[in-house]
Image (spheres, rainbow, N blue to C red):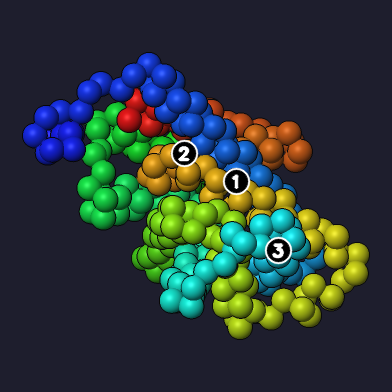
Amino acid sequence: MKPTGTDGLQPNPSPSPDHQHGAEARTGLGAVLVLLAAALWATFGLFAKVLYSRGYTPLELASIRATVGFIAAAVWLIPTARRRLRIGRQDLLFFAAYGVLGFALFETVFFMALERTTVAIAAALLYTAPAFVLLASRLLWHEHVPRRKLAALAMVLAGVLLVTGALTAVASGAAPLTWGAAALGLGAGAGYALYTLFSKVATARYGSAAALFWSFLFAALALALIAPPLEPILRRPDTLLLLLALGVVPTLVPYALYLAALHHLRASNAAMLASLEPVMAALLAMAVLGEALDPPRVVGVALIVGAAVLIAREDGQS
């Protein structure tokens, strides 16, 4: 259905060239912010590789990430953006759900999936999130889903399967996929989608500073109940700087960038662009760890990058 004007009868005039240019500029900025966030999220694998070898568990790292991330957010935002952090008492329930369901539960379910299957398969299932976001956007906001976006979604899902190596692992029988692992992995994808949807609402209503601060606070509190962070933070003085960096580099900064990007992008498009994270992780592994990109991964990279181009064009023309 074509859009109508304010009287509900006449179509809106075509957007002016200046309006179109401004929309494209905002889309471009949003895409760059998501790409930067994806690049920083991808560094988590490098941090985890070192910290797992030092005896830290996945849940401990999730709790440390949230706690250090919140403390860093408070140090950054309270002096510089105190007024923008103010919310009403009636908003606390929303932010509690945002932090607990959209962040803490998502991370917990993802790590439960990691315990039952390989990292590759868990990551591939996690990046079903764009499909969940697209479905929710259609149901909640009646977002139009053009064929180009459906094609981009298919390319993202296929690309993630190839880049993570999940398809090869399952096909060869090297990593059998149980129903329990599949359910947890899809649950993590749904949780990731929920985080994006909460973030879209929160940034529109309260701004990105409040969204970041309050979601991290409630996520840190929830994860601290599951895995208290103080003992693991103090356990090994030689890893303290690394743990502090974990809470900032692959945690606070990319989440802040992603929230800022949601001011300029549709939630579904932001989620699909964030699927470039496994591409960034593969490239980092190649550059830092010397891991080679085999032909399936190269194809996967090409599919995800191609999908990103389609998404950027679709959002810039909306």
Q: Earlier in the sequence, mark 1 or mark 3?
A: 3
Q: Quadrant of the C terminus?
A: top left
Secondary structure, mark 3, is helix
For image coordinates 85% across by 65% down, the residue present is 240
Front position among marks 2 and 3: 3
Farthest residue toward the front?
A: 7
Q: What amino acid does circle 1 point to?
A: Leu
Q: Is residue 16 visible?
A: yes
Q: Nearer the viewer, residue 21 or 313?
A: 21
Query: Residue 296 in the image: x percent, y percent?
Result: 50, 32
Query: Residue 285 in the image: x percent, y percent?
Result: 69, 40
State which quadrant residue 57 falls in: bottom right
Secondary structure, mark 2, is loop
Label drawn at residue 257: 1
Locate residue 298 relative to residue 74 in the image: left or right.
left
Farthest residue toward the top?
A: 17
Q: Which residue is mark 2?
A: 264
Q: Earlier in the sequence, mark 2 or mark 1?
A: 1
Q: Is residue 120 visible?
A: no
Query: Residue 100 in the image: x percent, y percent?
Result: 50, 72
Mark 3 packing: few (<14 Cα in 10 Å), some, or many (20+)?
A: some
Q: Which residue is mark 3?
A: 78
State which quadrant residue 219 falls in: bottom right
For image coordinates 35% across by 25% down, the residue present is 317
